[in-house]
Amino acid sequence: YAINGPGIKDGKDEPGEAGMLSFENAIDNNNNKAVGSRVGMLPLSNSSLEIGFSGYYAKPGNEQSPYKNVTASLAAVDLSYVKLISPVKGIIDIKGQYNISNVSNAIYFNPEDTTPYTFINSSSAYYAQLAYRPAMAGNDALKNIEIVSRYSAYNTPEGALWESIQSQLSVGVNYWFTWRTVLKTSLLQTTIEKGNANANGGHSHGGTTGNMFLVHLAVGL
């Protein structure tokens, strides 16, 4: 595929986000197009396992900006395994993905004293999810319940004003009314270990943890 692609923030409007990619380019900001693709494989004869590989390349800088030659490359590997397992009388659903983003070197300016600085602009994120649904249970209501747990992490560049190390852990229970209608409930814990940028472009160091209880009704069309 080929699309307009992202932009890159220079820090003028949001000083604490210089070097961050912005994927809200409804209008093309240069003469380049971002290109990408995904290849998926089904290595098992019953198609219960899928492994995918993705790639994406773009030049996000405005044509007249100092960042017009900056490049961005993104890559990902994903996995999905869904199988009815007789010994546990239910469906095991395992999903996961690992993403990495690399932006070439550029010079940015600290909003506090206008001094130039740079950093290795590399970010990574991943998640792993395990779900179990007792589809072979004798009780009809029990068959519709799904237990889900998920862990995810997100690391942004060291030295950037938006540097952070974050992780999330959630445990939830879903109830499937039909194959396309589900009520989801979950307890979500978010941990910020380091350096999330604040509104003034500075850093707030030290670990923080927050908990949320979420309820979500989804209907597929």
Image (spheres, grey):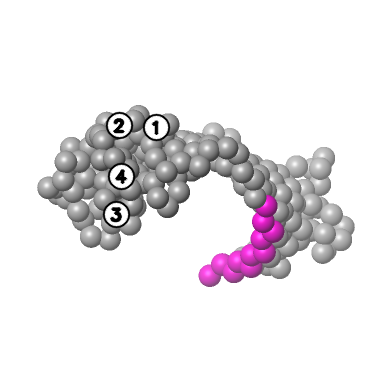
Image mark for residue 111: 4
* Residue 99 in the image, given as x and y percentages of width and height: 46, 37
Whether residue 149 sits left or right of residue 64 in the image: it is: right
Q: Nearer the viewer, residue 103 or 133?
A: 103
Identify residue for label 1.
159
Q: Check disc 4 and give the amino acid type.
A: Pro
Q: Secondary structure at mark 3?
A: loop
Q: Secondary structure at mark 4?
A: loop
Q: Check disc 2 and give the amino acid type.
A: Thr
Q: Are marks 1 and 2 in contact (CB under 8 Å)?
A: yes
- Check the image and name the residue furthest to the left: 64
- Check the image and name the residue furthest to the front: 113
Identify residue for label 2.
118
- Determine crowd level at label 4: few under 14, some 14-19, many 20+ residues with C-alpha closer than 10 A: some
Q: Sequence order check: which comes first, mark 1 or mark 2?
A: 2
Q: Nearer the viewer, residue 71 or 36?
A: 71
**Which residue is depicted at the point 82% across and 64% down?**
141
Q: Sequence order check: which comes first, mark 1 or mark 4?
A: 4
Identify residue for label 3.
13
Q: Are marks 2 and 4 in contact (CB under 8 Å)?
A: no
Give the Cα distance between marks 1 and 4.
14 Å
Range of the magenta residues? 211-221
